[in-house]
Amino acid sequence: ADDIGHLGRDCTTLVSCLPKSEHVAAALASLLEPHPGPRDLNANGADEKVAETDTDTDTGADRADRAGAQAHHHHAPAFRTWIDCSSGSASESQKLAGLLWGRGQRLFVDCGVSGGPAGAVAGSLTAMVGSRGDLCPDTKAIIDTFASKVVKCGGPGAGHAVKATNNAMLAANLWAASELLANLQACDIDINV
């Protein structure tokens, strides 16, 4: 596809793995941008223009919501499910889930993953999933292509919240281990014992 708009019109399920939730929201806003159709032409045959009103305090979800509202009378994207494997914000994921549900009952699945690049290549990641209701078999089948363990953690935002907690626990354990090993070295104890 040439751009995300084409993907959204051609695919029923989209999977993203972007650096932050703000990038996901920007992609979603781009996807929900109006795509002119026959009824969207003015009396002179020109495309209707919709004013942008971004402010410095807008969140990515705010911009996506505005784009979705503008697209209301335009051709709606065909996609039904967005699986987001980014290391996202639970609160932004909740906003995006609410936004998509309000735009035609589309499903946003936050899918935090753990297992690193080797796990991704091997298809053995652990997926921590948050979504409205149970995962449908088609959505689970897509996640199963890259994860050997899929854990439904709760509603929208829960997958990203559990992933963030997992990362924090790992960081805390690494920090504690390094401090304790440094303490042993300070006592002239061979840490390789």
Image: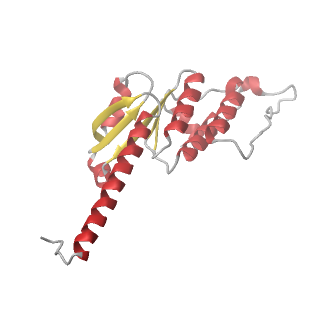
Percent of width and height locating residue 20: 52, 48
Question: Residue lying farthest left?
Answer: 193
Is 136 situated above or below 27? above
- Left or right placement of residue 122 versus residue 106 in this view: left
- Quarter the C terminus occupies: bottom left
Question: Residue lying farthest bottom?
Answer: 188
Residue closer to the observer: 34 or 135: 135
* Total tally of numbered discs in the picture: 0
Residue closer to the observer: 15 or 47: 15
Task: Identify the residue at horizontal 56%, vertical 33% (top origin).
Answer: 96
- Left or right placement of residue 39 versus residue 182 in this view: right
Is 112 situated above or below 72? below
What colour scheme was applied to this rendering of the protein? secondary structure
Task: Identify the residue at horizontal 52%, vertical 32% (top origin).
Answer: 94
- Left or right placement of residue 148 versus residue 63 in this view: left
Percent of width and height locating residue 90: 49, 38
- Left or right placement of residue 54 versus residue 125 in this view: right
Residue closer to the observer: 69 or 95: 95
Percent of width and height locating residue 11: 49, 32
Residue closer to the observer: 192 or 121: 192
Task: Identify the residue at horizontal 69%, vertical 33% (top origin).
Answer: 66
Q: Is residue 122 visible?
A: yes
Percent of width and height locating residue 143: 35, 36
Q: Is residue 35 visible?
A: no
Quadrant of the rendered structure where residue 62 is? top right
Quadrant of the rendered structure where residue 85 is? top left
